[in-house]
Every structure is written in C-alpha cells, then in structure tokens.
Amino acid sequence: MFKKVVFHSLIYGLGPFVPKIISLLMLPIFTKFLTTEDYGIQSVMNSSLGLISVLSMLGLQLPMSNVFFQHSNHFKKRWGQFYGFLNIWMIFYSFLLAFIIYLVIPKEVGENLYWIIILNIIPIVCFGPADVIGQLYYQLNQKPKQVVIRTIVISFITIALNFYTIVVLDLHYMGWFIANCISMLLLHFSYWYPLHYILKIKPIYKFKRVVLRKGLSVSLPMLPHYYGSFLLSSSDVLLLKFFLISTSQIGYYGFATSFGGLMAMAVGAINTAAAPVISEQIKLKNYDSVRSLTWGLQFLLIVLSSVGCFWLKDVFEIMVNNDELKTTYFLAAIFIMSHNYRPMYFGVATVLFYRERTRNLWKVTFGAGIICVLLNVLFIPIYGIKCPAYILFFSYLIMGYGTFFLKDYKEVAVAEFKPLLWLSLTIFSFAIVLIVVDLTFVYKILISLLYILTIPVYFYQNLKSQKT
C-alpha cells in the first residue's frame, strides 16, 4: 500500500517536476529579463485569482468523489448533471473574475489591463470545468499517467511560450499571461475531448434538482473551509498591496513564495495519490494502515524538505541572475517548510470527508485564515514584508493540527495519530532549517547526511514493529 502511494506520488509529483526543474534551470535567463516589478504584478495577479478560485467549482469535487465511490454503477449520469450546472455557473464566475482583476491589478499594467482580463477568462468561457472533472476522474480511478502526461506536455509548452514571449519578444509580465492562456486552452481541451467522446461524460442541463441540492448541501458548507486556504496562501500579497508596499517589493516577496508553490505542488501530488488509497483502507477498516501511511508520508516529507532547504542559499547563488532576488533564499526556506503539515492534515481530513463529517471543518481552516489576516494587519506595518512568511508557517500549523481537536473528528477517529508529537517535530525541523541554511558547506553536508540516514532507520523500525 505504501509503495503504491509512493509510486503514484512520484508519478503525480516527479512527472510535473521535470518541466519545473527545467524552469529552475532557466532562472538565470528569465531573471535577467524580468524585474522585481514583473514578479510583483504576477504575484498580485495570482492572489487576485485565488480570491475567488474557491468559487469556481463551488466545492462540488467532494460530492462528486463520494458519488464515484458510493454509486459506482451510474456515477457518470450524476456527474453529467453536476457538469451541466457548473457550465452555467462558469458564465457568472467569469464576470466575477473579470471584476476582481479590474479592482486589484497594479496600476503599472496600464493599458494592458483589459488584455489581462481577456486572457484569463477565455479558457473558462470555452471549456468550463472540463479540466477539473477530467482530472478527478483519472485520479479516482487511480490512473495517474493520464494526468501526468498532460501536465508534462502542457508544462513544456508553457516553458517554450514563456521563453518566446519573455526572452525573444521581451514582453515582460505579459509573456506569462499570454503563455498561460494558450497552455490552459490546450490543457482544458485535452480533458474535454475524452470526457465527451471517450468516457461519455457530457453536461446534462436538465439536471435533477434533488441531485444538485444534495451535492450543494455537502459542498457549500465546505466553501469557508476552502476559502480559509485562500486566506492563508494569497491574502498576504493583497495585504502588502493594501499597505502600499511597492510592486517591486511585492515582487521580491512573490519570487520567494514561488518556491513555496513548488512545495505545495509536491505535497499536492502526495495528497492526490494518497487520498483514494486512504479512502479505500477506511472502507476496508484497515485503520492501522491509514495511520502508518500518514506517518510515513509525514516523516519522509519533513526530512526531504529540510535537506532541500539546507542548500537553498547555494542554489540561489548559482541559479538566480539578479542580485536582489538572490537574497530571497531565507524567505523561500520558510515558505517551503510551511507546507510540512500537509500529510497529517490530509490524513485526518480524508477521514472526515469519507464520513461526510465536514460541517465544522471550516471552523479550523477558516479560523486559521482569519488569524493569518489579523496578524498580518497587525505586524506588516511594523516589521514589513518578511513577517507574513513566519505568520504563514504559524497559521498553517493551526489549520493542519487543529483539525485533530474537532469534536466531529473525535467521534469518527479511526486511529491515534499523536498530532502533538508530529507538531513538535515539524517546529523543530523548521528551526533547524533556519539555522543550517546559512552554515558553511561542510556543516551542511554532515547534517544532510544525518537527516537522510534517518529515513531507512525509521522505515526499518516501522516494518519491525508491524511484524511483532
């Protein structure tokens, strides 16, 4: 079971990481042509998209996943009804997205504002939720190659388009938006065609109200939960803009957050691979396997992310061709380590999702988001652009480990996960990274080897305990 999750995680994660690694190797080229102002515009834009992205699917992925497992013989018909409703909803969502972009985009974009709006809504208007539904289908059927092949191909196309628009045409930040629009159109179409003509999952516009009402009754209460994730991941940039931090300074901050985005993609791949397996083990009542899998993934993530962060300063020195951006390595380490809560979180969240005990989950996730916003409002005027990174780490811990103390979880808990132990280990590793990242080469080598050696020791002890 663990091998299966690791294998699928590698497919989901390492596949897309191949083009990401190429993008990193191209940093010396891109950072020569792009300014901190360009990165600032991109960061504000990404945050504005995050402001309403939670509304794009109205949280219907959860009831669609439940329908897949609980009504496996006729799930396509029900999915088609959700598909038809979402196609209609996407029209209204596009207008809302255009309005948000108009409000928050920095004034530096000038006359490019309307082009940016058009480039961001075209894929949505043309194909609706096809990419999300298609990816969900292959994920739940545990066919990661279908998702990964698309991701890799589209990623390489995006890299090529970015190079052409940014380096050859010298379009600066507009190159990102043009490349992203073309890539998203291709990605959406790659799912839309098999959905309609191979899998026969087509939108049904005469949907049954009872089906839709039941789905929304599960999904809509989850929106505050999903919105809490936005408050954590995107509100910091918008608050920096609110406090009149310059676009170039926001770009400095945003460049560091992009490495946190890479980490989020990696743990997202783990989550994508593990969720169906965990749900299956819960169904079979193999609760010890659920705990063992969650712990193993958590330990592996902490060790590997720590070792990677130890060397960020050296990597930035080699790869970043911009003296100002080189100094963001310390912030990047914080953003990367902030995602180490995720395996424990999605372990407990999968239990709640499977049992459909998500009514109060928003109290933790949305509460963590509100705390993040309030702390940023309080401390950004005092400490500037670096404090949101520390606040983010703290807030993610609240979201990740606070879920274990929900009454809903305690009533359906399938195993003892020992969250306080893993919380302590997460904080300890974070502190170690902040110290080691600035040490000399020799110390980094020794500490890295020590960390890596703990992996076989942990899994050997785990295997030994299972046999006894």
Image: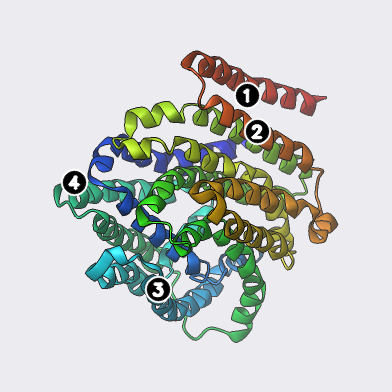
Q: Residues within 10 Å of mark 1 (few under 14, many from 20)?
A: some
Q: For marks 2 and 3, give the one nearer the viewer.
A: 3
Question: In the image, 253: left or right of 224?
Answer: left
Residue located beneath label 4 in the image = 167
Tell me if label 1 and label 3 are in contact, CB under 8 Å: no
Q: Is residue 439 placed above or below 228 in the rendered structure?
A: above
Residue 140 makes an appearance in the image: no
- The residue sitting at the front extreme is 382
- For the residue marked with disc 1, what is the amino acid? Ile
Q: CA distance from mark 2 to mark 4?
A: 41 Å
Mark number for residue 103? 3
Q: For marks 4 and 1, give the one nearer the viewer.
A: 4
- For the residue marked with disc 3, what is the amino acid? Leu
- Expressed as whole percent of the image width and height from the top left, the position of residue 313 reads 44, 29
Q: Earlier in the sequence, mark 2 or mark 1?
A: 2
- For the residue marked with disc 2, what is the amino acid? Phe
- Expressed as whole percent of the image width and height from the top left, the position of residue 74 reads 58, 70
Q: Is residue 465 placed above or below 442 in the rendered structure?
A: below
- The residue sitting at the left extreme is 169
Residue located beneath label 1 in the image = 455
* Element type where label 4 sits in the image: helix
Q: CA distance from mark 4 to mark 1?
A: 42 Å
- Expressed as whole percent of the image width and height from the top left, the position of residue 185 reads 30, 63
Mark number for residue 299? 2
* Element type where label 3 sits in the image: helix
Of 204 and 373, which appears nearest the observer? 373
Q: Residues within 10 Å of mark 4 (few under 14, many from 20)?
A: some
- For the residue marked with disc 4, what is the amino acid? Val
Q: For marks 4 and 3, give the one nearer the viewer.
A: 3
Tell me if label 4 and label 3 are in contact, CB under 8 Å: no
